[in-house]
Amino acid sequence: MSVATDNAIYVSEKAKEKIVKLMEDAGIANDNSYFLRVGVVGGGCSGLSYKLDFDNEVKPMDQTFEDNGVKIVTDLKSFLYLVNTELNFSDGLNGKGFYFDNPNASRSCGCGESFAV
């Protein structure tokens, strides 16, 4: 995990590679208006779940970051749960896909898709 230098959301090299590939597959890699939207929604076995999507509309209270060449946007409420979190990607036989190393989570479920604070 990256060493947090300020309140931000971080992206590992492996996650960056997968994000770039997904953006290429979606035909939006060369459109600088698109970014990765990260959010937290209620649900999952631990109470909160992560949400990832590509978006091109920044809302007034959104928080914007860039790490490792990836532009990340999150709403203010989600950012309170995600501060200093790193987005990772794991593939292979036991790979989880995208997952978060969240220092704010007090517990997470076995699948790693939900958490509690």
Image (spheres, rainbow, N blue to C red):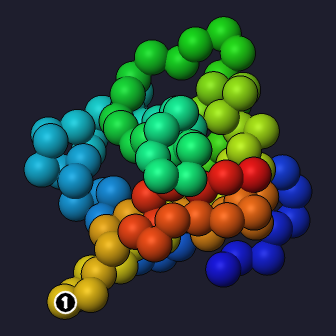
What's the residue type where badge 1 is placed? Leu
The vertical placement of 96 against 56, above or below, is below
- Label 1 secondary element: loop
> How far across and down, in percent of the image, does residue 50 sit?
49, 46
Can you give x and y, in whole percent of width and height, for residue 116 in the image? 67, 52
Quarter where residue 103 is shown? bottom right
Residue 33: tell me if it is visible: yes
x and y percent of residue 38 in the render? 51, 41
Picture quarter with the N terminus: bottom right
Residue 101: image quadrant is: bottom right
Asked if residue 36 can be seen in this view, the reply is no
Image height of 55 relative to 22, above or below = above
Residue beneath the point at 63% across and 26% down:
75
Q: Nearer the viewer, residue 99 or 13?
A: 99
The residue under label 1 is 93
- Please state if 115 lies on the left or on the right of 14 as rendered: right
